[in-house]
Amino acid sequence: MIDTHAHLYSEQFSADCDDVIRKALESGVEYFVIPATDSETYEPMMKLCGAYPKICFPAIGLHPTSVGDNYADELKFVEKQLETNQFTAVGEIGIDCYWSLDNIVRQREAFEIQLKLAEHYHLPVIIHARESFREIFNILDRVHTDGLKGVFHSFTGTKEDYLKIKEYKTFKTGIGGVVTFKNSNLSQVVEMIPLTDIVLETDAPYLTPHPYRGKRNESAYIPIIARKIAEIKKLSIDEVDRITSENAKTLFNLPEPYSIR
């Protein structure tokens, strides 16, 4: 299985990151996409991916909640790194209308600039869309081309949101721990999403799936998410693993073979 979104460089993993990765490998997770959120997270992200170059793949971007007064400098940093290093994606980028409505104009600008960078460097985007689907769709309706692809990270939208995403034809939905929450309606939406449009993710250390909700999330919990999707779709977990892994491999241009063992 592939965890397409994990912040394993986070301070919450500083004491036991190696053990966290080992447990994930033992649970069947073989690859990890590791997105930065700003220049401060860049070094720890690259250090982690440098320590595990065959299984951890870096992405770089300016997260919407990190868009501040210095956002122009942050965007220049992103572009400079894209010019000199190899990345799996541009992300985590997007718009956040939950935490950061006060800087929405800057968020829009930063998002659009990074979409264009991703297209220029032929990389997929990892889109953060918390309570901001309308804002994001407004921008994509203007700038989307067939060359722009990616994933709506931690997808928690409605059926209508998914159908709009489907219109672009180049985006996957990242399904994580929220699908296991008893108070979430995501299961009904996932039921209608073809497995070919889904990739698995944890967003570790956040959004821990049931029954570990409230504790630190880990990539080892990816099988819990896969089992829930298999239950919703009445498929085997092997089928969920195979198709979502192929989706992730294709989207992020991950190498073969999956296993390093």
Image (cartoon, helix red, strand yellow):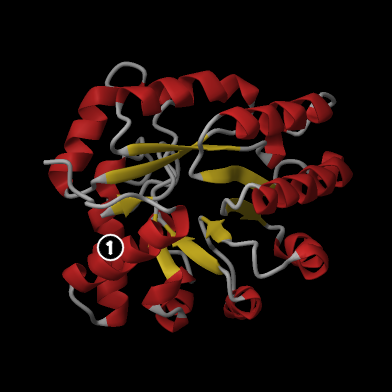
Picture layout, residue 96 above or below residue 169: above
Q: Which x, y percent locates residue 72?
A: 83, 29
Can residue 257 be seen by looking at this rendering? yes
Q: Is residue 185 left or right of residue 80?
A: left
Residue in the image at 59% along x and 62% along y: 149
Q: Which x, y percent locates residue 35?
A: 51, 38
Picture layout, residue 152 above or below residue 22: below
Q: Which x, y percent locates residue 230?
A: 26, 73
Which quadrant of the structure image shows residue 106?
A: top right
Picture layout, residue 142 above or below residue 122: below
Residue in the image at 54% along x and 63% along y: 156
Q: Is residue 125 left or right of residue 256?
A: right
Residue picked out by circle 1 = 226
Can residue 96 be seen by looking at this rendering? no
Tag 1: amino acid = Ala
Residue in the image at 71% along x and 52% along y: 115
Q: How many marks?
A: 1
